[in-house]
Amino acid sequence: MNNKSLQSYYFIGIGGMGMSALARLCLINGHCVFGYDITPSQIIEDLILEGAQVIYDLSTEALPPEVCDKNIEVVYTAAISRDHPQLKYFLAQGNNVRKRAFFLAELTSKIKTLAIAGTHGKTTTSAFLTHIFSESSQVFTSIMGGFFKDQKSNLITQGDDFMIVEADEYDRSFLQLYPAIACITSMDPDHLDVYETDSSFSEAFIQFSSQVSQALVVAYGLPVNGITYGINVPADYRVENIIKNKFGYNFNIITPLRTYKNVYLNQLGIHNISNALCAIAMADQVGIFPENSIKALTTFPGVQRRMNLMKYGDAIIIDDYAHHPTEIENVLNTLKGFYPERKNCVIFQPHLFSRTQDFMNEFALVLSEFDEVVLLDIYPARELPISGISTQVLLNKLNHSNKKLIQKSAIKESIDKSNARLFAFLGAGDIGLEVDKLKNHFTAA
């Protein structure tokens, strides 16, 4: 971002993961930052400490006088309705108003950009790639969809030779990006409230792939041409001979030029091996040798709410962002692989009425594979309720004898009374905050 011409920005939905990173980038470059969000959060509090001014009243009367000028640049998240009073005000006034996706596209248009796309694995893959770039002393900026563990920002700024971003398929946002290098980790249908059909969803990814100018890395088996990666498949970059250990895996990586034996990854989940391999393949395309990327894996800090493990008395708690049936299946397989002797319990908060509607049967099938099932009410995020779609309907579909629907206030009691010794907190809403409420009861892992 060029800071030679200082500007004032107003972010509508400033507390979102992607929006807050862009707001922070503006602050770092000396611009004035204002914003609105519906409720306070730690992310917003940190932005305020860094110089942002934020309000929680959506009325136009609440707008600070400084942002009522036509020269204020306005950025809004796709989750904001076109009926939002402030958005309508700025549009009517003639301000330069852009969705977050367009603003991000502008920032990446003059920088060599690496974009991570896919239904699953975007955040962890971008985190691996960011860590590889950092450990190999690259000059880059990264905007991740999550935080490294024990970090308060998903923006990493070490210069602007490269930019690493997540290419979000929601609202077709990623179609605004024209990266030099990109990957596609998966194409399982999602966001059918936007795409309507599976084929339309796939077509968007194919369109995205055509916008990549230099190199496209794709998971083996996807219907897109590119440099392939995968596990135990004949891909260009592949992993073989996986051996599970206490806190991760050892395995071999085969690249187009050589084989690297006994590589160690300190993360749980075969899907995370795949994510790391994807990042290594992408880094290789810009000249970061695989041996340097592999070395960086040994110090990878992990990502908040991605297979995070905590001890709760003699029980284990896993906190993960999984909110799609495929992601839940990955978590379950990991739990069974590492803790086969422990009775498990899933505590799942469905995310979005539309996603619950689209994958009701798939959710019911995968959740029924856990030993115990505890469900929370649907986290609506940007959506209004859909008639006939509720957690109770999902609960009724579960083929399970040990299932229940509870309020968040009853989580600790449910855990304490359960016979399970392994609890998976899953969902993309605010369920992670419920894990935080238990932290005073955690013991050393």
Image (cartoon, rainbow, N blue to C red):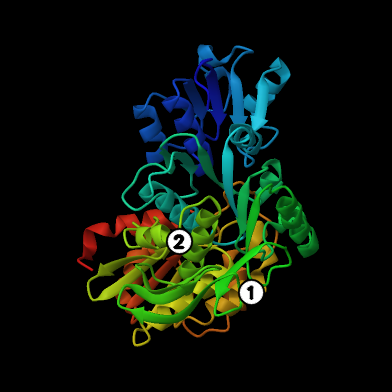
**Image: 344 above or below 360:** below
Q: In this view, does 416 lie to the left or right of 6?
A: left
Residue at image position (39%, 55%) is: 304
Residue 340, placed above or below residue 389 = below
- Where is mark 1, residue-wise? 362
- Mark 1 burial class by Cα count in 10 Å: few <14, some 14-19, many 20+: some
Toward which corner of the image does residue 30 lie, by quadrant? top left
The amino acid beneath tag 2 is Pro
The type of residue carrying mark 1 is Glu
In the picture, the quarter occupied by the C terminus is: bottom left
> In this orientation, which residue lies closer to the viewer: 322 or 234?
234
Res. 427 visible in picture: no
Q: Does dot 1 land on a helix, a strand or a loop?
A: helix
Dot placed on the residue nearer the N-terminal end, 2 or 1: 2
Of residues 187 and 206, which is closer to you in this image?
A: 206
Horizontal side of residue 354 vs 402, given as left or right: right
Q: Which of 271 and 261 is in front in this view?
A: 261
**Residue 290, disc:** 2
Picture coordinates of residue 272, whole percent (x, y): 46, 67
